[in-house]
Amino acid sequence: MTFSIVARSADGESLGVAVASKFLAVGAAVPAVEAGVGAVATQAHANLAYRPEGLALLRAGADAAGAVRQLVGADAGKEVRQLGVVTPNGPGATFTGAECHDWAGGVAGDGYAIQGNILTGSGVVEAMEAAWLASDPAATLARRLLAALAAGDAAGGDRRGRQSAALLVARRGGGYGGQSDVEVDLRADDDARPVDVLERLLGLHELYFTRPDPATLLALDGELAAEVSGLLAGLGHTGEPDTALAAWAGIENLEERVVPGRIDPLVLDWLRKAAG
C-alpha cells in the first residue's frame, strides 16, 4: 500500500526517507532516520519495531544488508513485510516478503533502496530508481528524494489512490539554527495530492530555513535601499534599512536570510508581495 525510497546524499552526511501511500499519515509509521547512523522504511504490514531496532543494529555496526537479515530473520511475520535500509556508506538493502500484495518488490544500489507494494506495476519502482540515478548529486538530499517520489507517483504509485506522503532527512547539525539533526521533516497526512503538497512545503522550508547564496545578494544602498525602506514603512517598520528589514524578516520567519548591508532577492520578492 506504499512506495518509498531510503537514501543518502553524495557526501554521505545526509540520510533520509521519502514515502507516499493510500494510508492516513504514512509519515507517522514508515520512516526512521538517525544522523550518522542510517535510515529505515518499514511498510506493507509494517512492523514498527523495525525502526528503533534497525537503527540500533546500524548504530552497533551492522551494514544495511546485515540489518535487514537480522530484522526479518527474527520476525515470524516477515512474509507480509517490506523493508528498506541505507547507511552512511555502502549499498542499501531492500526486502519484500513473499506474501505482500501485488505488485510488490524493490531495488537497491549504492546509497539507496526503493520498495513498494500494492502498486500499479513494477514501473513505479523503475521510475523512482531512474529519477534517483538521474538526479544531480550536488542537489540536496531532500530534493533528490522528492524527485524520486514524484516519479513513482507519476508512474501510477499506489493502485488504490493517494492520501499521504512524508519526507524525513537528518544531518548532524542540519536542523534549525544548527541545534538539531533534523534537516527536513515534512508531511501531508490526508490530501488528494500529497506529493504535490510536499513539493510546496519543501519550497517553503528552503525559503525559511536555508541561507541565501552569497553570489545572489544585492547591495542594500541607493535606489534599492530607498525602495526597501518605503516598502517596510508601509508595513509599519521604520528606521535604518538594515534594522527595519531585520525586524520585518523576524516576523515573517525569514531571519535566516538576513545579511547586513545586503538583501536576498527572495526576501526582496517576498517583501514586495507583502507590501502589495
Image (cartoon, helix red, strand yellow):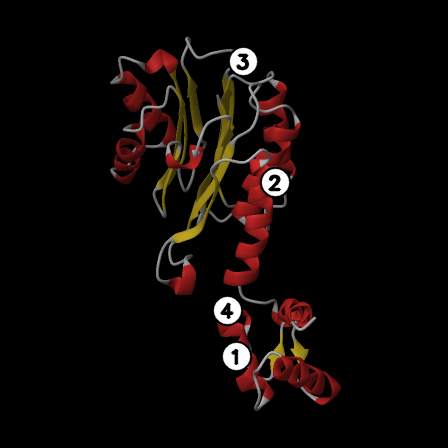
Mark 2–mark 3 distance (CA, rounded to whole Å): 24 Å
Q: Earlier in the sequence, mark 4 or mark 2?
A: 2
Q: Which mark is residue 179?
A: none
Viewer-nearest residue: 203 or 65:
203
- Residue underneath mark 3: 103
- Cα distance in 3D space between marks 4 and 3: 44 Å
List the residue tagged with mark 1. 246
Q: Position of residue 234 (x, y in %)?
A: 64, 81
Q: CA distance from mark 4 to mark 2?
A: 25 Å
Position of residue 182 relative to residue 218, above or below, is: above
In the image, what residue type sits under mark 1? Ala
Secondary structure, mark 3, is: loop
**What residue is disc 2 on?**
196
- Residue drawn at (61%, 40%), measured in percent from left and top? 196
Amino acid, disc 3: Trp
Give the mark toward the camera: 2 or 3. Answer: 2
